[in-house]
Image (cartoon, grey):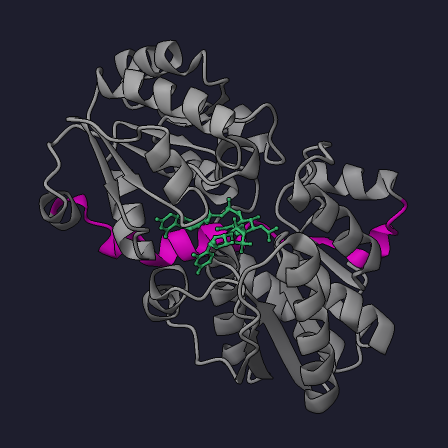
Amino acid sequence: PLVLHVLGARPNFVKAAPVVRALGELGVRQGIIHTGQHYDALMSDVFFADLGLPEPVANLGVGSGTHAKQTAALLVGLEEVVQEQEPDLVVVYGDVNSTLAAILVCAKLGVKTAHVEAGLRSFDRGMPEEVNRVVTDALADVLFATSPEALSYLASEGVPASKVHLVGNPMIDSLYAALPSLDPAPVVERLGLPERYAVATLHRPANVDTVEAAKELVDAVLDVSRQIPLVVPVHPRGKARLAAAGLDGPSVKVVDPLGYVDFLSLVRGAALVITDSGGVQEETTVLGVPCLTVRPNTERPITITHGTNRLVTPALLPAAAEKALADGASTPAGELPVLWDGQAGPRVAKVISAWLKGDNLAP
Ligand code: UD1
Ligand code: UDP
């Protein structure tokens, strides 16, 4: 039997690595299809290297475009490669357009699918990712959830409990695997940062796609930079608009996206993280670094109840930063979320390999 993993964007690589490794250890035949949604070396190649992911068996090179154009190119490319490779199972990750396209293609071709990171909900259909999550979970044959609230969301959408496995968080498996090599000192020195600094990442369309939103956010970030020097590894999506809005200054260092190990090293040594990323909310939860998420909602509420995350508006960001910095390095509020223990990949692999051998998939 053959398992194919469809990956396209930066967070997909981080989530897939532990699953690929664990399936490999069980001797399962597998391959990666890279859709090419992310293609810059710093958005893709560096993750394959840092995470030890095997070379893809195919790269569809779909690139960027509007949602319709990108999704259409993904559908056409994926249909061809799935028909050619004849996998027994296709595994998709997270909530990006590559995830959505793969699940649609497989549903129509009658190919079985598994979704890793099922059941996250922001309940905000204005987020493109929320649309992708809802459709992906409606069509997947097996759903792997990272946290318990996903189980009730999926149940309320009519997904049978027999399809859903609570396995923990593979993104956190990757974090634990990298932990021994996460040393802030070299990257702090290379980027010319002081000992005490904050890190910001901003790429949500609602924050960076309009001049007005970008300006409001940049003004708030500049305000924070008067309290603490900031480094901003800037996602290509917002690069031009954030620069045009004035993201620059004596205490703001804008740099290219960082590789996985460099980025998490920087986060590990930071006094504060400001973000709108999904994954970074989870990683700061585990690293115990205060995190301010500039969004009206989160599909990862467990990072607020069990971690260091707080939701803020741009207007409230400077005061929230002042408080977070004064409170010092916060430790997680309670115990880490259940099963965020570095063993999610092996749990996923166990279910998949049992299923490939003909066992029932029900938990
Ligand atoms: C995508 C995901 C988002 C995820 C993010 C992770 C969707 C709908 N969105 O957003 O959920 O949080 O990835 O990083 O799938 N670009 C480059 N080089 C690249 C890739 C992109 O320059 O290698 C630029 C292009 O101008 C492109 C823009 O970034 O138009 C957006 O890329 P796209 O993949 O469409 O969406 P992201 O914003 O990256
Ligand atoms: N990340 C990275 N370099 C960066 C910014 C983020 O390696 O410059 C990592 C981050 O640690 C996490 C993943 O990329 O593992 C999250 O990706 P992103 O924020 O782009 O996507 P989201 O999680 O919002 O979908």
Query: Does residue 46 sit above or below 167 in this rendering?
Result: below
- Closer-to-camera residue (336/93): 93
The residue located at (77%, 71%) in the rendering is 105
- Closer-to-camera residue (91/258): 258
Is residue 121 located in the magenta-colored stretch of the structure?
no
- Closer-to-camera residue (318/171): 318
The answer to whether residue 110 shows anywhere in this view is no
The residue located at (38%, 35%) in the rendering is 242
Is residue 179 located in the magenta-colored stretch of the structure?
yes
The percent coordinates of residue 251 (x first, y second) are: 17, 26
Judged left or right of residue 49, residue 65 is right
Judged left or right of residue 95, residue 180 is left
The residue located at (25%, 55%) in the rendering is 180
Which quadrant of the rendered structure holds the N terminus? Answer: bottom right
Which quadrant of the rendered structure holds the C terminus? Answer: bottom right
The answer to whether residue 86 shows anywhere in this view is yes
Which region is colored magenta? 158-185
The mark total stands at 0
Query: Does residue 193 sit above or below 348 in this rendering?
Result: above
The residue located at (20%, 29%) in the rendering is 197
- Closer-to-camera residue (130/160): 130
Report the predominant secondary structure element of the magenta stretch: helix
Dividing the picture into quadrants, the one containing residue 222 is top left
